[in-house]
């Protein structure tokens, strides 16, 4: 089902770039304290699970697993805001750091990618084993949103999740790669690639890993995402090349197989995502609700006014999850 969103942009923040950038400037410092638990993965790596409060097996308080975006973390403003909103609604919250995120390198040469559904699936099974009476839900932003939708589609009716929300997900990775190479979107690409480079440089400080990583001084590697994904992401994660990666890691072909109540929130003016990546009604299962707004940018959706902003996602996401608690 595709519906028009009720979101209305803040006065003074109608531009897609203003919507995208404003939250990172207005709420730049983390304000929710969390503790991290390091979990050993089956392949000998580690993941961080960040929680603001101790988790409990409580059928009255669903646990929401949050998947951040590219180079994000528990300290990202959108994650901080969501945690605050969910805790106020008596949900439990846990944030999974993708491998190597949060400023701490992972142990293996591999990193994470836009189709990396195996890690949250493994983590969800661990959480369900620990808290069998607790409903498990999930929210994914950007890259994490695509991972979440792919995971839901792959698992179908066997999914461990009771409900899910994906925000600004690049459901067609090839189309999104083209979009972020155009116009002002190239500035976002430059910023993200710089962050990826810094993460990889931290990783090369481990002599055991340095030889398995590409030459970080090669300017072609960080020219754009297509070059980076072809030279680094694809070969390191078992893909034949960048086109194979984009094809197999995109969630769009799997949306029809989703069998859990799922909300997708997306803005047509998203500067990261090509409009052709937005699915048609026929591509969605009956359990998927796609709410489209004309404006909102990428993980923006700031309403109210420039002087008194309201973070609409922190109202809409808990409202949807409340319906399935």
Image (cartoon, grey):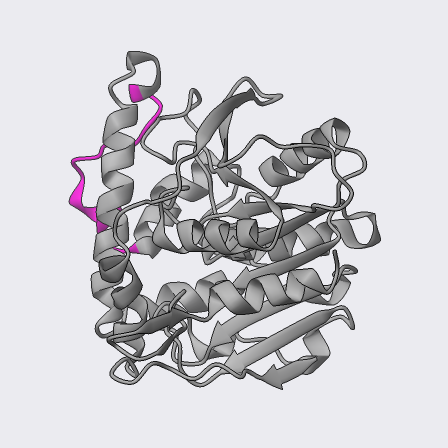
Q: Quadrant of the N terminus?
A: bottom right
Q: From the viewer's perspective, is 222 left or right of 47?
A: left
Examine the structure image and report whether residue 96 is included in the region drawn in magenta: no
Residue 78 falls in image quadrant: bottom left
Q: Is residue 216 magenta?
A: yes
**Residue drawn 39% across and 31% down?**
100
Rendering coords of residue 184 (x, y %)? 21, 72
Q: What stretch is highlighted in magenta?
A: 210-224
Residue 286 shows in this picture: yes
Residue shown at 73% from the left, 49% from the top: 161
* Residue 212 image point, x, y percent: 35, 23
On the picture, is 137 further left or further right than 274? Answer: right
The vertical placement of 271 against 314, above or below, is: below
Q: Report the residue at 24% width, 39% height from top.
A: 197
Residue lying at 76% horizontally and 62% vertically, measured from the top left: 257
Q: Main secondary structure of the magenta part?
A: loop
Q: Nearer the viewer, residue 139 or 224?
A: 139
């Amino acid at each position: 089902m595709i519906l028009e969103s009720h979101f209305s942009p803040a006065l003074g923040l109608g531009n897609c770039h203003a919507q995208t950038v404003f939250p990172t400037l207005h709420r730049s410092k983390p304000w929710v304290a969390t503790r991290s638990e390091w979990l050993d993965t089956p392949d000998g790596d580690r993941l961080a699970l960040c929680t603001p409060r101790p988790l409990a097996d409580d059928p009255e308080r669903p646990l929401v697993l949050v998947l951040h975006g590219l180079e994000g973390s528990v300290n990202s403003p959108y994650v901080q805001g969501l945690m605050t909103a969910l805790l106020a609604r008596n949900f439990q919250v846990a944030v999974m750091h993708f491998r190597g995120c949060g400023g701490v390198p992972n142990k293996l040469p591999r990193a994470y990618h836009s189709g990396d559904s195996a890690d949250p699936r493994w983590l969800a099974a661990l959480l369900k084993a620990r808290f069998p009476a607790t409903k498990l839900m999930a929210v994914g932003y950007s890259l994490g949103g695509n991972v979440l939708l792919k995971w839901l589609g792959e698992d179908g009716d066997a999914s461990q999740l009771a409900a899910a929300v994906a925000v600004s997900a690049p459901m067609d990775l090839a189309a999104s790669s083209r979009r972020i190479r155009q116009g002002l979107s190239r500035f976002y690409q430059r910023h993200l690639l710089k962050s990826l480079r810094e993460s990889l440089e931290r990783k090369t400080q481990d002599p055991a890993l340095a030889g398995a990583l590409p030459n970080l001084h090669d300017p072609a590697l960080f020219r754009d995402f297509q070059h980076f994904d072809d030279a680094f992401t694809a070969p390191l994660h078992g893909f034949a090349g960048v086109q194979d990666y984009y094809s197999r890691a995109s969630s769009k072909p799997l949306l029809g197989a989703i069998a859990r109540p799922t909300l997708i929130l997306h803005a047509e003016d998203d500067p990261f995502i090509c409009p052709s990546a937005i699915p048609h009604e026929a591509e969605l299962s009956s359990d998927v609700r796609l709410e489209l707004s004309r404006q909102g940018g990428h993980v923006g959706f700031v309403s109210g006014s420039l002087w008194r902003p309201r973070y609409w996602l922190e109202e809409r996401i808990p409202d949807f999850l409340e319906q399935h608690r």
